[in-house]
Image (cartoon, rainbow, N blue to C red):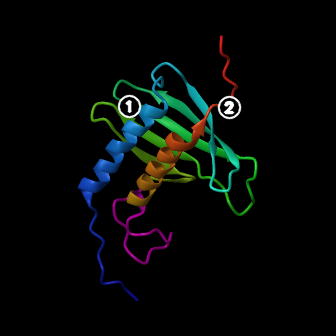
Amino acid sequence: MTNRYIYVPDLIADMAECDVNYIRLCRLFPDMDVEDELRFGVKTENQDSASVTIRVRERCRFTTMLTIDVDSANDRPFIKWPSLEIRMYHDVKSAEVIRFERHRNFRFRYPTPNANMFQPDEKSQINRFLGELLTHCIENGHSLRPLAFT
């Protein structure tokens, strides 16, 4: 069985999502050029707390490689937060997911059906997921340490 529908990527929307993800990451982690790690808490929908860790893996002149891991005290064996690796392009101010769990090198379009059962727009969906995660962190993030007032 073959599918006659051919997915056509919306490159303008995809690049816009990557550009906004760059801005979101800079807003969440403004000191990434000097700090190696950022940890903070975030509330989930059922009011559980999860901790988010953003780590700088590599710094180059025009790019920074980050990993984002989310850990929840209430992780269940069948529900797990994904691990993401992001490449930030500072010269064009854009950020894209280059690894989602153990999958990397995503194509802009996949044929359907395919052996790995990827959606035709897998790369777009993963970058949108990053945007939703970063937006949730910006709106619901909190410090893991108590603040000291003097």
Residue type, mark 2 in image:
Leu
Q: Main secondary structure of the magenta part?
A: loop
Quarter of the image for residue 12 reads: bottom left
Q: Position of residue 32 (x, y in %)?
A: 48, 25
Please give the name of the residue rendered at 45% of the width and 74% of the height, measured from the top-left corner.
114
Q: In the rendered image, which quarter contains the N terminus?
A: bottom left
Which amino acid is tagged 1? Thr
Judging by the rendered image, the residue that carries numbered circle 1 is: 63
Above/below status of 74 relative to 139: below
Q: Answer above or below: position of 126 versus 7.
A: above
Question: Could you tell me which residue is drawn at 25 percent across and 56 percent down?
Answer: 11
In which quarter of the view is residue 122 placed?
bottom left
Residues drawn in magenta: 106-123
- Is residue 18 rendered to the left or right of residue 46? left
Where does the image place residue 123, in percent across and percent down from the top left? 40, 58
Query: Residue 132's spot in the image, x, y percent?
Result: 47, 51
Decide which of tag 1 and tag 2 comes sooner along the chain.
1
Q: Mark 2 points at which residue?
A: 144
Whether residue 21 is situated above or below residue 58 in the rendered picture: below
- What is the residue that sits farthest to the front in this orientation? 150
